[in-house]
Image: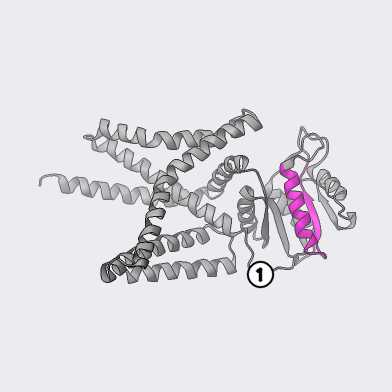
Amino acid sequence: MYLLIIISCFALLTSFLIYFKDPRTLLLGLSFLTFLVTAGISFLIITIRYIHTNGQTFWSSLLLLFIFILAVLLALSPTILIIVFIFNGLRLLKREGRSLKNFMLLALGILLFLYPIIGNTYLDTFSDQPLMLYFYYLGTLIIFYLFIMTIAYTISSFLNLFHWKKQDIDYVVVLGSGLIGDKVPPLLASRINKGIQIYKSNQNCKRIFSGGQGPDERISEGQAMALYAEKQGISTDDIIIENKARNTRENILFSKELMTNGSRFAIISNYYHLFRALLLAKELEIPCIGFGAKTRLYFTLNAYIRELVGYLYLKRKLHITLLSILVILLTIFIIILYLLKQPL
């Protein structure tokens, strides 16, 4: 138990150190996840020992009730997640149209629902075939790895939304997200409005609206955002337009070129997209912070899945290497177990 407490404290300390040094890393989420797991196990062990030593008291009953409620919530969480994914997936298709990218949330919900059924059927069918069982364990390992990375990515993304101390900002960079002709859609408007909010709390900063012109857009995203901000009362003297960027990487690079050397700036994007933008900035060795703009839940969940896939692709070499190591270790472990069961 003492080892778990030490690990928990070490993981929490690591999280704080990473956060204050540069929170734009998945290690922040992994260390915080380690803290949550070990702290939870330690709390459970301490509670059991307390009840065993002191018997049934008011406090022990309260602790047992808390653990029971937590256990029920954890047990129901997969079902709740599946229901949320399917419900919001259908809602997204109804409101945003039937495109391939809009099917991702519904598809994931259906896969999560079918996975236990398919897994049990597979085990029943191939229970006496070692090679087929190996493929099952291999698939389970990959799914578990992706599950842990998803949780760590989510925690890191969430923690990057908070700033424990006020930081002076010289520039606010609002990232483009597409126009409807020459009109700013609600998604992009939420980014601009968030940028205006940050701008008003940093009166000496300037706003950079970044985004080029797409094939179906009448003007550049940067220009459209500037016009929208002017209608909200933002002075043109505090607006800089970047109108060449075609993606998030170029948004950050081209905006940085418009700043004076040593400037401190903040990226504005929607909650689901912000962390990947910050990771790109870190990869480009550009220090910055980020602020998230609100987005409707049904859209956020689907877009968040795409962002997670985008992150895995961005760091594909790292994750392929880690997965390869885990696959090798699993293979060795399975072979040893198989040999131990065989007669000499």
Residue 221 locus on image (x, y percent)? 79, 43
Q: Which is more toward the observer, 114 or 50? A: 50
Report the side of 194 relative to 273 (left or right): right
Q: Residue at x 44, y 46 (%)?
A: 77
Q: Is residue 177 visible?
A: no
Residue reaching furthest to the top: 98
Residue 7 locus on image (x, y percent)? 39, 68
Q: Mark 1 is on which residue type?
A: Lys
Q: Is residue 161 visible?
A: yes
Q: Which is more toward the observer, 116 or 79? A: 79
Magenta part of the chain: 187-212
Residue 113 locus on image (x, y percent)? 42, 35
Q: Residue at x 51, y 58 (%)?
A: 29
Give the quadrant of the N terminus. bottom left
Q: Residue at x 53, y 53 (%)?
A: 153
Residue corresponding to mark 1:
165
Q: Which is more toward the observer, 102 or 40? A: 40
Q: Is residue 86 above or below residue 308?
A: above
Image color mode? one colour
Report the side of 86 relative to 126 (left or right): right
Question: Under tag 1, what secondary structure?
Answer: loop
Q: Residues within 10 Å of mark 1 (few under 14, many from 20)?
A: few
Q: Which is more toward the observer, 110 or 241? A: 110
Residue 16 locus on image (x, y percent)? 53, 69
Residue 231 within the segment the image draws in magenta: no
Rendered image quadrant of residue 11 = bottom left
Residue 206 within the segment the image draws in magenta: yes
Q: Is residue 270 above or below residue 92?
A: below
